[in-house]
Amino acid sequence: MEYKKELQRLIAEFKTNYLSSVSIDLVIFGFHDGQLKVLLLRWKGTDDWCLPGGRILHEENLDEAAYRSLRERTGLSEIFLQQFHTFGDVMRYKNFSKQETLLKLGLPDEAQRELVSRDVSVGYYALVEFAEVTPTPDFFTEECRWWDVDQIPLLLFDHNDMITIALKTLRRQLSYQPIGYKLLPEKFTMPDLQQLYETILGQELDRRNFQKRMLGYNILERLEERKFGGAHKAPYLYRFDKEKYEKALANESLFVG
């Protein structure tokens, strides 16, 4: 009973306070245990997964709506956010069995029309430090968790396409966006940095060449600390020299391939 009351309240709120026919979707990237990851939501009572996102309040601009949704799903406020594509294909919902999923959710007809009517979605990608995120589902979902980017299931709507395009955007922007700085913890090893580049680029990189190139950019500070606990010799820890890193990004002078 409480669920239906809250649902009715939300539907009324959608009609009154939010823009119709336009929404935002978020590809939230994190990096952990050598894997690039994406945050996904599972709808209540189903095995169906989708990206976080939502509607836009009348008084919000697009970026404000995206930041609000990010805060709600991750618990973070200071997040790197980048708009990367607009999705408006007529067949956006080809992987979405509306009737089956909405029946599982127990949504009334009015809610079904409001939630799955065709709209245009503005895609954003976000870069977060994995350990700082508190994955939080919304009213319509019961699970929010990380998936390895190479193990993403078949998603609702066109969300698989969104992840593919967001990942391609990351690859193109490695030379001029702070991708490593935002995804890695403050202190990291050279193997950590190489694994990040490899998982984004989808290819293996020669260890010696990678290290030589990254040190040649003069954006890393080697610390007198090592990371212990592995089977091999404990590697040194590094951190980014923020000022030099930002200068290199401004010059679009970083590239690994």
Image: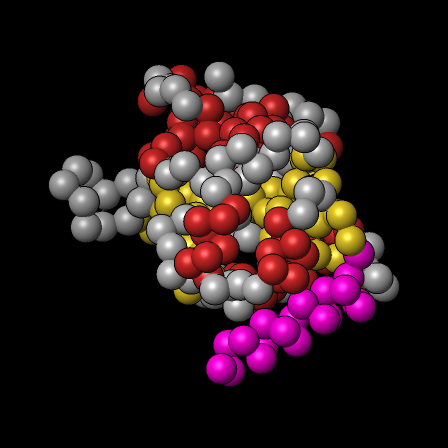
Horizontal and vertical percent position of residue 149: 41, 37
Left or right of 174 on screen, residue 156 = left
Residue at the (31%, 45%) spot, across then down:
33
Segment colored magenta: 1-19
Left or right: where 102 falls relative to 22 = left
Left/right placement of residue 122 relative to residue 53 reads right
Q: Percent from the top left, x then y, of residue 56?
A: 75, 57
Q: Is residue 241 magenta?
A: no
User: What secondary structure predominates along the stretch shown in magenta?
Assistant: helix
Q: Residue at x 17, y 38 (%)?
A: 232
User: In which quarter of the view is residue 248 placed?
Assistant: top right
Above-or-below relation of 103 to 30: below
110 or 54, nearer to the observer: 110
160 or 12: nearer the eye? 12
Q: Residue furthest right?
A: 59
The furthest residue to the left: 231
Residue 168 occupies quadrant: top right
Q: Residue at x 46, y 61 (%)?
A: 105
